Amino acid sequence: MIKIIYLLKRKEGTTPEQFRTHYENSHVLLAKKYIGHLLKGYIRNYPGFALRNPSNIPAGTVPAPYDIGYDCITEMFVEDQAAIEEITRIFNDPEINPILAEDELRFLQREETVMIMVDVVDNGTQSA
């Protein structure tokens, strides 16, 4: 199993609520339509309160919130490298690519999108 993480930043002039609504009600549906058959999981994480180095905050103080600079951390899970290659092919299809790009321009700062492919290590310590 391979995990792909996308860091997404909303378009200037778009509120966090508008960003989330558009992503969930438009872009997610496009992703499911075109690559849903290849996804083993598709999770969107919308950051709430964040702290920078929380272990360094003195007891009894109120920490200042930290802006991580991104509005969504998306996780996609695929079976293998062949699935990634197929997703790449679909995303670059001359009929599909303009549809996805046009939708992204409505809510994303496309040039700020970061994609990370990660190795996942799970020591079985996660609780349900």
Image (cartoon, rainbow, N blue to C red):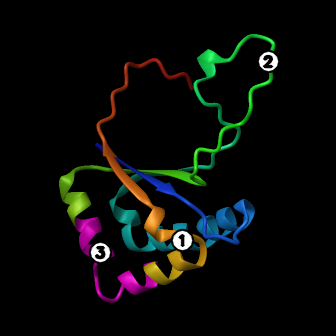
Picture coordinates of residue 26, whole percent (x, y): 59, 74
Residue 54 seen in render? yes
Tag 2 secondary structure:
loop
In the picture, measured across the screen, residue 36 lies left or right of residue 49, that is: left
Badge 1 or badge 3: first in the primary sequence: 1
Residue at 57% x, 52% y: name it.
70
- Up the image or down, 113 lies above or below 26; here it is above
Q: Nearer the viewer, residue 76 or 32?
A: 76
Q: Pointer 3 and pointer 2: residues touching (CB < 8 Å)?
A: no
Hey, what amino acid is under mark 2? Answer: Thr
- Residue 114: say if magenta: no
Q: Nearer the viewer, mark 2 or mark 1?
A: 2
Residue at 37% x, 55% y: name it.
115
Residue 43 seen in render? no
Q: Nearer the viewer, mark 3 or mark 2?
A: 2
Q: Disc 1 to disc 3, how far (Cα)?
A: 15 Å
Q: Residues within 10 Å of mark 2 (few under 14, many from 20)?
A: few
- Residue 92: say if magenta: yes
Q: Nearer the viewer, residue 95 or 17?
A: 17
Tell me the residue that label 2 is attached to. 61
Over which residues does the magenta segment extend? 86-100
What is the residue that sits farthest to the top in this orientation? Answer: 59
What is the residue that sits farthest to the bottom in this orientation? Answer: 95
In the picture, measured across the screen, residue 44 lies left or right of residue 37, that is: right
Q: Pointer 2 and pointer 1: residues touching (CB < 8 Å)?
A: no
Tell me the residue that label 1 is attached to. 27
Quadrant (top left/top right/bottom left/bottom right) for the C terminus = top right
Tell me the residue that label 3 is attached to. 90
Q: Disc 3 to disc 2, how far (Cα)?
A: 50 Å
- Up the image or down, 51 lies above or below 67; here it is above
